[in-house]
Image: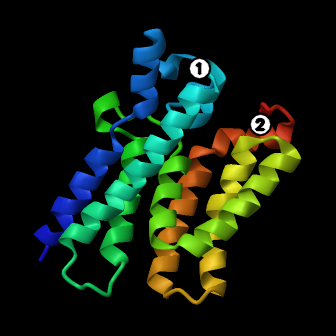
């Protein structure tokens, strides 16, 4: 029983540890993306350093990575009606993105991967939170603020939509991870030093 959880969680973490932003930097410009821009190995920093095309590719691949993590949980679940293992594996993929074993645990902030996890498991809740996040970006021009609006609002939207509490609590873990990864952005927002797109 324990192996039914440990193996898929490890596999999902390793899947999440594949950094497409890092590989894009190496392939397109021969650089380590973590030494440029914000120092973050994610789609937003890819946009700043390498432009829209590279950022879009990285974003899509990171979304798919989150979906793949959920898919690993789907393959290993023993209860066909439960989403818990799938969401836990999604969290593992996000943790892998943020702290990838292949890059000495220096990765991204996990937002695109979170989009993939949420979209495949809770599509309408993710859509509502995604619209709120995009509105926040459109009004403020701060990607970090929109990212936080998206992730932090998700558990509340799920609560209103009547999802089971276990899933809401697990999504709250994802929201806390996002807040932790954006702690410097929050300081910059408070101090008026955050960079706009």
Q: Which residue is mark 1?
A: 50
Q: Earlier in the sequence, mark 1 or mark 2?
A: 1
Outermost residue, front side:
53
* Left or right of residue 83: residue 9: left
Q: Residue at x 44, y 82 (%)?
A: 166
Q: Which residue is mark 2?
A: 188
Residue 150: where, in percent of width, then height?
Answer: 66, 59
| Mark 1 neighbour density, 10 Å: few (under 14) some (14–19) many (20 or more) | some
Question: Does residue 92 appear anywhere in the picture?
Answer: no
How much space separates mark 1 and mark 2, taking CA atoms?
A: 23 Å
Question: Helix, strand or loop at disc 2?
Answer: helix
Question: Helix, strand or loop at disc 1?
Answer: helix
| Mark 2 neighbour density, 10 Å: few (under 14) some (14–19) many (20 or more) | few
Numbered tag placed on residue 32 in the rendering: none
Contact between marks 1 and 2 (CB within 8 A): the answer is no
Q: Residue at x 53, y 86 (%)?
A: 163
Q: In the rendered view of the protein, which quadrant contains the C terminus?
A: top right
| Vertical order, 30 against 186 (above or below) | above
Q: Residue at x 66, y 51 (%)?
A: 147
């Amino acid at each position: 029983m324990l192996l039914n959880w440990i193996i898929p969680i490890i596999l999902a973490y390793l899947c999440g540890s594949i950094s497409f932003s890092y590989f894009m930097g190496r392939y397109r410009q021969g650089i380590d993306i973590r030494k440029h821009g914000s120092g973050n190995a994610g789609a937003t920093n890819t946009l700043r350093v390498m432009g829209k095309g590279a950022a879009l590719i990285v974003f899509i691949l990171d979304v798919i990575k989150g979906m793949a993590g959920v898919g690993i949980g789907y393959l290993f679940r023993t209860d066909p009606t439960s989403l818990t293992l799938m969401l836990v594996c999604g969290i593992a993929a996000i943790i892998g993105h943020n702290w990838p074993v292949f890059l000495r645990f220096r990765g991204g902030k996990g937002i695109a991967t979170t989009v993939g996890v949420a979209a495949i498991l809770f599509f309408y809740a993710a859509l509502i939170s995604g619209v709120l996040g995009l509105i926040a970006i459109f009004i403020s021009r701060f990607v970090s603020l929109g990212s936080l609006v998206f992730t932090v609002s998700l558990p509340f939207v799920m609560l209103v939509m009547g999802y089971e509490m276990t899933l809401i609590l697990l999504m709250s873990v994802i929201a806390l991870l996002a807040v932790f990864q954006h702690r410097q952005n929050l300081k910059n927002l408070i101090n008026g030093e955050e960079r706009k797109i």
